Amino acid sequence: MKQTKLSEQIIQEISRKGKKNLFGTIVKTLLIWGIGWTVLVLTGKQSDLFTLSSPPIWFWIVFAIILIFPIWKFQIYKFLRPSVHGEVIEVENTQRLGGKKGDVGGYIDTLNIGQMGRVDTCIVTVNGTRGGIWKYELSRESAQFAREYYQQGDMVFVPMFAEYPFNESRDAEKPFCLCCGRAAGAHEAVCPTCGVPLVKKEEKG
């Protein structure tokens, strides 16, 4: 089986974008923590309910919510994932509930419920060479691309800060973004969403 390598340029651009996003996420998280805990302390001075005096249960509940919310909201844990080398062990075809044309922001209420539906999804499962099972989900147009690009037994590489695997066992027939999973047009060289170079058939590293 042939082996291809991801170009250093793409790895560097993904890393640059990832570090930039991580910095912005840390700043937003610190702002939320600072504002939230300041409001909590000031509220505690006005109300016995949110103080450390007995019982301090409501203080710690709100404290924990403020602590966890930005981590969940901004998914900081995604930035801490290491690079992964591994083998594709399963390519699963399924459907997920989601926006028919794209991700639906906010709550699913009467204003956007009509935009919800079953979304074509492909889940690629990778067995890491250093241990661990990793799952990568591609939806809508990217799902069909994933079925053609990934096959069981393929060796893949996911650089740090990337969201999707680079296939070292076969070329991508369409330009593909490792950050957002976009399968782009043949004429495109840079992802219009992420601004990083797309993996293309001629990219050999």
Image (cartoon, grey):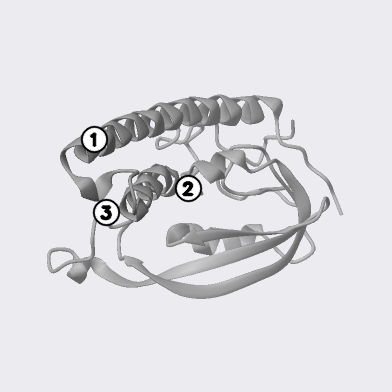
Residue in the picture at 56% in, 46% down? 163
The amino acid type, in three-letter code, at marker 2 is Arg
To which quarter of the image does residue 3 belong? top right
Q: Which residue is mark 1?
A: 39
Q: How many marks?
A: 3
Residue closer to the observer: 79 or 104: 79
Q: Secondary structure at mark 3?
A: loop
Residue 95 in picture, x, y percent from top left: 45, 74
Closer to the chain start, of discs 2 and 1, is 1
**Quick one: which residue is furthest to the front in this view?**
54
Residue 191 in picture, x, y percent from top left: 46, 36
Q: CA distance from mark 2 to mark 1?
A: 41 Å
Compared with residue 184, is residue 142 higher up or lower down, i.e. above or below? below
The amino acid type, in three-letter code, at marker 1 is Val
Q: CA distance from mark 3 to mark 1?
A: 27 Å
Q: Nearer the viewer, mark 2 or mark 3?
A: 3
Q: CA distance from mark 2 to mark 3?
A: 19 Å
Q: Which residue is mark 3?
A: 105
Q: Residues within 10 Å of mark 2 (few under 14, many from 20)?
A: many
To which quarter of the image does residue 83 belong? top right
For the residues labelled 3 and 1, say whether their Cβ atoms are less than 8 Å apart: no
Q: Which residue is mark 2?
A: 182
Mark seen at residue 191: none
Closer to the chain start, of discs 3 and 1, is 1
Q: Is residue 90 visible?
A: yes
Residue 186 in picture, x, y percent from top left: 50, 42
Q: Decide if residue 75 is on the left or right side of residue 166.
A: left
Q: Is residue 175 visible?
A: no
Q: Nearer the viewer, mark 2 or mark 1?
A: 1
Residue closer to the observer: 45 or 181: 45
Q: Secondary structure at mark 1?
A: helix
Residue in the picture at 65% in, 42% down? 201
